[in-house]
Amino acid sequence: MKIPTDRFYSQSHEWLLFEGGMGVVGVTDYAQRELSDIVFVELPTMGMHVRRGEAVATIESVKAASDIYAPATGEVREVNAALTQNPGLINTDPYGQGWLFRIHVEDPGETERLESPEAYAKLTSGATGSTP
């Protein structure tokens, strides 16, 4: 299981990567494996203001539907439209092409409430140190 060391993780299995002043959000390798084959993604609306911990998107797989929670408070600035045509990108590349949305993070200090790669690895009993 991949757990890149360049991002923060939530206990609900979302990741947050700071990139160019924005936060990129996706679901972890662990989450996509648990969900299995992803068949549909409902993304947040661009311009939507989200609060940390709020359900903002939904992923449906052949097994179940799962809410996606905002790992930080801010405004959604971009969504990954490619997922509407190919939601399986989350399965094949959860830390790359399978990203969900970009958010302007209001308070970068909120990352202190997220898990480090090492803590997330312990949470999921996974290995750390891999790169995206």
Image: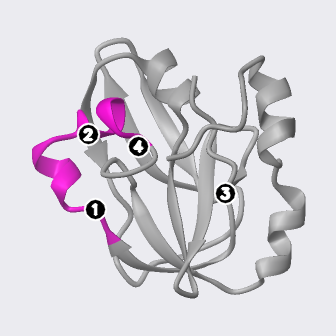
Q: Earlier in the sequence, mark 4 or mark 3?
A: 3
- Image mark for residue 7: 3
Q: Mark 2 Cα within 10 Å, few/some/many (few <14, many 20+)?
A: some
Q: CA separation, marks 2 and 3?
A: 19 Å
Q: Judge left or right: residue 107 versus residue 90.
A: right
Task: Write the residue at 82% across / 49% down.
Answer: 116
Asked whether disc 1 touches disc 2, contact meaning CB atoms under 8 Å apart, the reply is: yes
Relative image position of residue 88 (x, y in whole percent): 23, 33
Q: Judge left or right: residue 15 versus residue 123.
A: left
SS for callout 2 = helix
Question: What range is drawn magenta here?
Answer: 79-94
The residue under label 1 is which amino acid type?
A: Asn
**Image height check: is 37 above or below 128?**
above
The residue under label 3 is which amino acid type?
A: Arg
Q: CA separation, marks 4 and 3?
A: 21 Å
Asked whether disc 4 touches disc 3, contact meaning CB atoms under 8 Å apart, the reply is: no
- Image mark for residue 80: 1
Task: Write the residue at 71% across / 56% down.
Answer: 53
Task: Write the residue at 35% across / 39% down.
Answer: 93
Residue ranking furthest to the left = 85
The residue under label 2 is which amino acid type?
A: Leu
**Is residue 93 found inside the magenta-colored segment of the image?**
yes
The residue that label 4 is drawn on is 58
Q: CA separation, marks 1 and 3?
A: 18 Å
Asked whether disc 1 touches disc 3, contact meaning CB atoms under 8 Å apart, the reply is: no
- Marks 4, 2: nearer the viewer: 2
